[in-house]
Amino acid sequence: MRILVIEDEKKVASFIKRGLEEAGYSVDLAKDGEEGIYAAESEDYDLIVLDLILPRKSGLEVCKELRQTKIRAPILILSAKDSVDDKVMGLDAGADDYLAKPFAFNELLARIRALLRRGEALSPVKLMIGDLVLDTVSREVTRSGKEIKLTNREYALLEYFMINAGKILSRTQLSEHVWDYTFDTFSNVIDVYINYLRNKVDRDFEPKLIQTVRGIGYVLKLPKEAEEKAETKS
């Protein structure tokens, strides 16, 4: 999942980014309202964390403008303004939730999970490719009924592959959705993590699901013969 944090206080932004990344999310930062709007309209985010007091354009203005431009990602407002009227204005502007500062980070994570689950209600809780199953709620991954332990980054990478099963994903797409916009696409980190996944998801199983498309990227799919067998069984 990819999250945009629009926050002008550097220490707060850094704290949120570090904590969310440790929880397995890919995080981009914007330091003012105009930069936040540009980022939200330029990239596809699963959720936006928005401060209200921002330079150049306030959080309320950002929220209203994003909703007017049909940005549907859940918006969670974080603000030192904690009066009932402030919360009502934020929610009426189009936000999905409101959390007052200071906050417990565990509560922030819980609220983010709750907002993301609302979107998942429109999509399958379990993603399946052949005998590979990923549960988006419990974050449990199994293949042929055998549990596979993944790190947060490996899980994020596999989830993105499974959401886009059958689609060829470029290194740029993988870096943007699993890492962040500052990631160096010319490094070998993506290849390293692909190998980590293959060792856990493919090495002891057949057929092999993660395939390299030379010069383009990677794709997660059943080989043609396996698809034909699955169709015959069904």
Image (cartoon, helix red, strand yellow):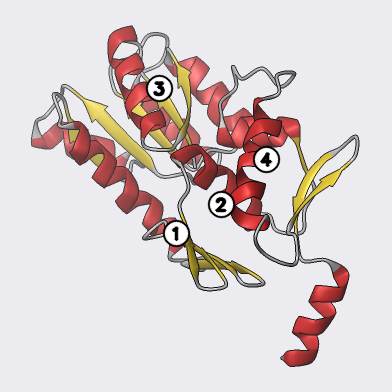
Q: Which residue is mark 2?
A: 159
Q: Quadrant of residue 40?
A: top right
Gap between marks 2 and 4, in whole Å?
16 Å
Query: In the current view of this chain or complex, which residue is farthest to the left?
Result: 83
Query: In the current view of this chain or complex, which residue is farthest to the front?
Result: 204
Q: Secondary structure at mark 2?
A: helix
Q: Amino acid at mark 3?
A: Ile
Q: Which mark is residue 136?
A: 1
Q: Which residue is mark 4?
A: 195
The residue at 80%/83% (across/down) is 229
- Which of 5 and 63 lies nearest the eye of the viewer? 5
Q: Secondary structure at mark 3?
A: strand
Q: Which mark is residue 116?
A: none
The location of residue 190, given as percent across then percent down, is 67, 31
36 left or right of 191 in image: left
Q: Nearer the viewer, mark 3 or mark 4?
A: 4
Neighbourhood count class around disc 1 (C-alpha, 10 Å): few under 14, some 14–19, many 20 upward: some
Neighbourhood count class around disc 4 (C-alpha, 10 Å): few under 14, some 14–19, many 20 upward: some
The location of residue 232, given as percent across then percent down, is 80, 90
Q: Which residue is mark 3?
A: 6
Gap between marks 1 and 2, in whole Å?
8 Å
Q: Is there a contact, CB below 8 Å, between mark 1 and mark 2?
A: yes
Q: Earlier in the sequence, mark 2 or mark 3?
A: 3
Q: Amino acid at mark 4?
A: Asn
The residue at 67%/72% (across/down) is 130
Q: Earlier in the sequence, mark 2 or mark 4?
A: 2
